[in-house]
Amino acid sequence: MTRATSLVRNAFVSKRFLLFLLTGGFAAAVNWGSRILYNHWMPYSAAIVVAYITGMITAFVLAKMFVFTESQHSTRRSAFFFTLVNLVAVVQTWAVSVGLAYYVFPRLGMTWHDRDIAHLVGVIVPVFTSYIGHKKFSFKH
């Protein structure tokens, strides 16, 4: 096994990562579902960002309670770094969601729930970068 393979295995094949996926999956469902709700009152692009904030608050509370319980940071410091990591992730989510919904799917002729599917893919994309960011910065052990 190479050193890189070993690092990836240690980082992503763990109880902590599984808990991150479960709590993050729930927060992603909150994000995705709230975007559908918000979309009744605001444009798709804005609804993505507001829904991301809703999901981010959910994710922070769950991560602090269940995933990164041994963090040495105060809640305030963790929240600050959590927000910074999520600023990167929201850009990823927005770019993928809008790119798929407005450019890729129309070229493919895809119209069935195109925005919902685009946003779902956008929410999934930053899972790995977010985990690393939260582990190294938000909830440093």
Image (cartoon, helix red, strand yellow):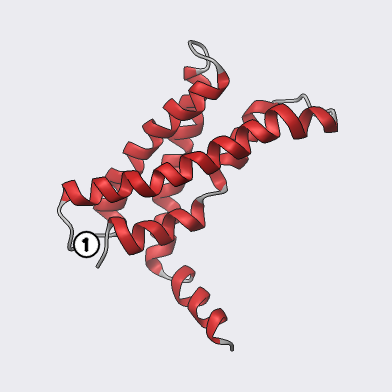
Please provide percent x and percent y for residue 94: 55, 35
Three-letter amino acid code at disc 1? Answer: Ser
Q: Which residue is mark 1?
A: 71
Going by the picture, which residue comes out furthest to the top? 41
Picture residue at 42% right of the left edge, 70% below the top:
14
Please provide percent x and percent y for residue 76: 17, 46
Going by the picture, which residue comes out furthest to the left? 74
| In the depicted structure, whether residue 129 falls above or below residue 35 | below
| In the depicted structure, whether residue 61 falls above or below residue 38 | below
The image quarter containing residue 53 is: top left
70 or 103: nearer the viewer? 103
Please provide percent x and percent y for residue 133: 39, 58
Please provide percent x and percent y for residue 61: 27, 44
Does dot 1 land on a helix, a strand or a loop?
A: loop
| In the depicted structure, whether residue 32 falls above or below residue 72 | above
Picture residue at 38% right of the left edge, 49% below the top:
85
The image quarter containing residue 21 is: bottom left
Picture residue at 35% right of the left edge, 46% below the top:
84
- Near mark 1 (Cα within 10 A), the count class, few <14, some 14-19 or many ≥20, is some
Q: How many marks?
A: 1
Picture residue at 37% right of the left edge, 65% below the top:
16
Residue 43 in the figure: left or right of residue 74: right
Residue 82 in the figure: left or right of residue 96: left
| In the depicted structure, whether residue 63 falls above or below residue 117 | below
Looking at the rendering, in which quadrant would you find the N terminus? bottom right
Residue 43 in the figure: left or right of residue 71: right
93 or 40: nearer the viewer? 93
Looking at the rendering, in which quadrant would you find the C terminus? bottom left
